[in-house]
Amino acid sequence: MVTTSSSKSIEPGTDVGRSSLQVFGHLLQGLIRDRWSGTITANTEDWKKRIYIDQGRFCFATSTLIDDRLGEVLYRRDLLTIDQLAELAMKVTPTAKFGQVMRKHGIMSSSQLWHVLQTQIICIIKSLFMNEHISYLIQRDTPPAGGLTVIDDCHALVDNFKAFNVIFLKFCNSIDDKTFLMISKKKSASLRRGTFYGDMLALIERNSKVHEVVKSSRLSESYTMTALLELLTANVCSLNTDFVNKDTLARVELIAIKTAADNYRLVLEKATAAFVRQGCESELGEVRKFSLTLVHPELRTLVLDCDGDISLNALARMADHCAVDPSRVYFYASRIWTLTRFLVQTAVDLLPAAEVQQIVQTYRRLVTR
């Protein structure tokens, strides 16, 4: 018998029915903590997905949904263009899987393939959390022979998925028939056609209503809505009726995050002006890349826009996460301060002393006040 952190006991091998994704997340964490081995099968009218667990670690996953195929996952991660996806898919045979085709044609090395197979497993599990409720069956079983791509730190991964579930459902519930998207031309300029997000912008340009974008997308509704949420968080798009409650960010318990973000913005303004004067504004791209290493990539809450700024939507996603897990307030505040220190260090490394002085003085004033 497995006891979840929600104090619900379940007997492996029995249909445990239907529950919210928060309860399902507690179930997964209970199985992980107990180093359980077996399979969890989840299904809706549209798909059936199976997660394999070996000694409390995710090791394999299958799905009947086309969006969960390896090529589709890589396309959504901008690791393949739509043309590359189509070309490689033509070479897949009953004896040559997509990953083997990529390896044969030099698209990826063995180590890269290992990591993207892990990514596919993670994406399939994360997709379960794009629902409000789910039906599932747990069975004690031996992992399949191919289940060698083991994923570590699964408990923390599920924590991130539970937070994503809250953020995702809040976004979906804020959309109605009149909601439409507005594209920032400046902040979308780097997204090329043929790439996943470039193609998503093309859909939005043809019809900006969210419901119409969902209808015309080649993806399922859940994956399309997830992509739109990512574009909003990165400030590439905005909604005509913003789903962000600005009063939420003013709550006393979130003051540490807001203060850290305000301070980062003050340093960013000084650094950006200095980078522009020295003709090296492209270095802000390195700051954006660094920000992606500070939070788990499946959660994507601390995301910078093309100007290097933290968008209001990104702050709102952090606030939603903290509502589920208050301990994350310190986590996000400390990550934003780390980002600020990285920005200052980048300026010190690249700019003349005269330019750096004002940036460093601003930073020191902020940390001592």
Image: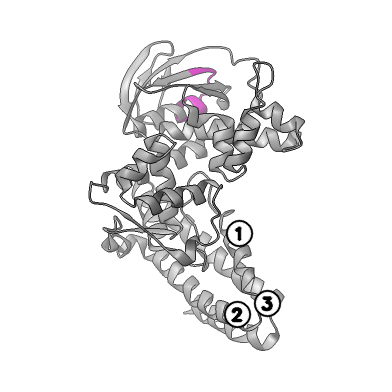
Q: What percent of the width, then of the height, locates residue 97?
A: 66, 23
| Magenta-drawn stretch contains 140 | no
| Residues packed near mark 3 inside 10 Å, few (<14), some (14 to 19) or many (20 plus) | some
Of marks 2 and 1, which one's residue comes earlier in the chain? 2
Q: Residue at x 71, y 74 (%)?
A: 349
Q: Which residue is mark 3?
A: 348
Q: Residue at x 41, y 65 (%)?
A: 256
Q: Residue furthest front?
A: 206
Residue ranking furthest to the bottom? 354
| Residue 312 placement: quadrant | bottom left
Between label 2 and label 1, give the one nearer the viewer.
2
Badge 1 density bin: few <14, some 14–19, many ≥20, Cα 10 Å: some
- The residue where tag 1 is placed is 290
| Left/right of residue 4 with respect to residue 55 in the rendered view | left
Quadrant containing the N terminus is top left
Q: From which residue to which does the magenta span run?
A: 29-39
Q: Amino acid at mark 3?
A: Val
* Mark 1 → mark 3, Cα distance in angstroms: 16 Å
Q: Earlier along the polypeptide chain: callout 2 or callout 3?
A: 2
Q: Return the residue nearer the eye: 290 or 88.
A: 88
Residue placed under numbered mark 2 in the picture: 276
Q: Which numbered marker is on residue 6?
A: none
